[in-house]
Image: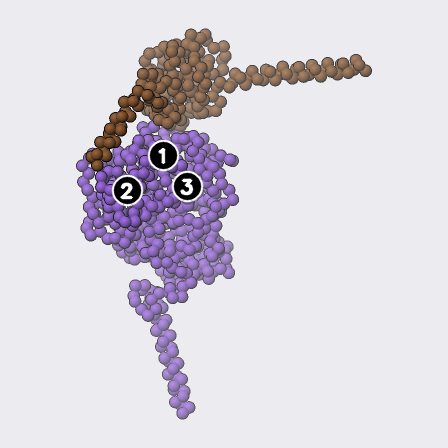
Chain colours: A purple, B brown
Amino acid sequence: MRIFSLERRKTIFIIILVLLSILQMGILWTGKNPGVPFLFPTQKLWSSVDLPDINDVKGEYLKPKKITVSDGSGILYWSLNTSDNLSRAIWSDFNKSYFRQILEQKPIEGAKSYEQDWHTLIKMKSIILEFENPVSTEIISWTTDYKSLFTMPLKQIYKIAIFPAESINNNENTLYVYDGETVYKYVVKTEQGNMKKDDYISMINGIHKNEASIPLNRLAYSYPSVKNHELIVSLDVKSERKIWDLLVKTPDEIILNRDNLDNIETYLLGDIYRGSMVTTFKDDSTSIICSDTEQVLRYYKNGFLDYQYRNRTLGEKGRISDAFEKALAFIEHRRSLVEGVEIILNSMVLEDKDENYVFTFDYVIDGMEVKIISQQDEAVRPAITIVANSDRVVDVKWYIKTFSNNDYYNYYSLYFFDIFDNKMIKDYPEPLHNLNIYDISIDYICPENSMRAEPYWFIDTESQIIHLRMQGKES
Amino acid sequence: MLKKIMFILLVSSLMILGSLVCMAYGDDDINEGSYMATRLNDFVDFAPSAVNVENDAPQEEEYSDEAVIEQYSSLFFETEDETEVEFITDIQDCVDKESQKCTFYATISENIQIDEGDNIVVMAFVQKDDSYELLASGEFEITIKYLRPIELNLPNTGKDNPNYVRIIVFPKNSYDNLSLDNVQIYCKTKVIDNKKFDFESTLFNGPMDIIKHVNGKISD
């Protein structure tokens, strides 16, 4: 009886060991082969970070940089605040309806000569949407959940001009889509839930009365030597804007100290399998390194995250939308750390060696981007740079910060010529007389180790981008 | 005692008189300088005051618009054609329909040849009877490629009443030695539409508008 009991206990013990080994094997298998279906699909089961579905949030990463209204004079333009209701309504029409219609139809051949000339089109009565850089139609197709049934001549979208008054049909809107070289004409239906065509027309006709937006002058009209015919600036001496300084902090959840290592690992490693990861806390307490044979993640005290997959060439370049999905997944696993700003796609390019895609993202607050100045080389960098292919993310540079209004604001002149009174202009020895201005914008700059972001003029010239700190009127 | 008080009163009154005289001299300085553009690149709008073309040469040696205009009135206003010298180029103008102000824009010429550190002076005049009225004047650094806009309140309105605008440009350091070789003269005729109530056109257009409106309704 006693022997039977002992044998029985041994059997139960062996069964438990076998079950444990299967469990261990399952964990290892799913960790190394994320796509393989198994009893223990992912580590999400015990992850403490709540993850939203990528499909629910992917549209939030794509937004136009500018929405402007042209009154048809070719001189004056009104820039809408991208966070106000009008802008949201226009962008919603594109997301819900117009992008899908652009993808499902072939462009119309424009019979009139101006229909192929973007610079002529923008001088006419229209509403113009502009991305920071051209966006691949494949990415737009993925974010709008619509796949084109045929090969499209339109490969990327840079700017779109809406001509509501062009078609005589009340339920049609005319769109001119510019990819940076060619203009494509589309006639789209105004579907249920969209803004009515009359709303677009009255927006253009009533823009003079809109006190929320400042009229801007097309600089090339007044100064024909300006090479960028689309550059709009304020030539009103009185134009000004109230801008807050920003308080920039490293998120509390990932403040670097030995007591907080578990939290840091939980938040920063995210979906990265950490079974074989070794974490090293640097002696000078300025950074930690989590690494294994395949990847290394460095996190610095100033909130800078540097992730590298050791074998960058491993994996197929694949489709840009798949790589973009991987990039968004990486951000979303850590998105909860960033507060007070939107994260918007800035650019997408192929890597030099043509192996991976490089995506850059900006922090955006009140329509202004927040750029980071690196302490090492004083270069201005985007908030997030992700190199990815269709299989995985291979490189990430990310300044993880939280943002809120600081204790200080000022009124800043937007008058174009006030730029030249700037005290910092002497930092640029190139004579302004030969300066060719391609673009001007107002954005924040935050030094990577600073807790304050301040507004700057960003002046894009032929040879460099000049950054001039804006001078408040009450200083 | 009375003598002492009288003496103190006399000394005090002399001191007060002396102070008043000094203050009066200070005011004279301010008056002379107030006609000049005090801040670089700021355009100064002048109250309409017709410049007499026949005036004598100025008495002061320091630069002032008034003195330069008086000294070179024949050069500035009696020259019929525009000069070949080009300090500013691409001169554009735009009339604001609401305010009826005319704004001039210009770019500093790429071939400009003036001494290092020198600035250019731009004066804008409008013809009024036999004289020219100075509407605006300013001094500009040539390091800035684009000239600040020059906003003019042109006095004449209506098609029958054009404004003859004359813009004079010269290097500031050469103000005592101006000639056709170092002065740019630019002339422009500007017509400002009369936005005021036009009784005659209303009489004609009013009934026509009503007829058009009724026709439109019938065709609908």
Mark 1: few/some/many CA within 10 Å (<14, 14-19, 20+): some
Using the rendered image, report if marks 3 and 2 lie on a common chain.
yes
| Comes first in the chain, label 1 or label 2 | 2
Q: Which mark is residue A197?
A: 2
Question: What residue appears at the point 46 percent right and 62 percent down from the top-left corner?
Answer: A262
Q: Is residue B211 positioned above or below B55 on the image?
A: below
Q: Is residue A80 positioned above or below A42 on the image?
A: above
| Comes first in the chain, label 3 or label 1 | 1
Q: Where residue B99 sits: x, y (%)? A: 39, 26
| Residue A396 shows in this picture | yes
User: Alpha-carbon distance for marks 3 and 2?
Assistant: 33 Å
Q: Which mark is residue A208?
A: 1
User: Alpha-carbon distance for marks 3 and 1?
Assistant: 26 Å
Q: Nearer the viewer, residue A347 or B213?
A: B213
Q: Where residue B90 sits: x, y (%)? A: 32, 24
- Which of the 4 image quarters holds residue A428? top left
Tell me the quarter of the image containing the C terminus of chain B: top left
Tell me the quarter of the image containing the N terminus of chain B: top right
Which residue is tagged 3?
A443
Q: Amino acid at mark 1?
A: His
| Residue A450 shows in this picture | no
Chain hosting mark 1: A
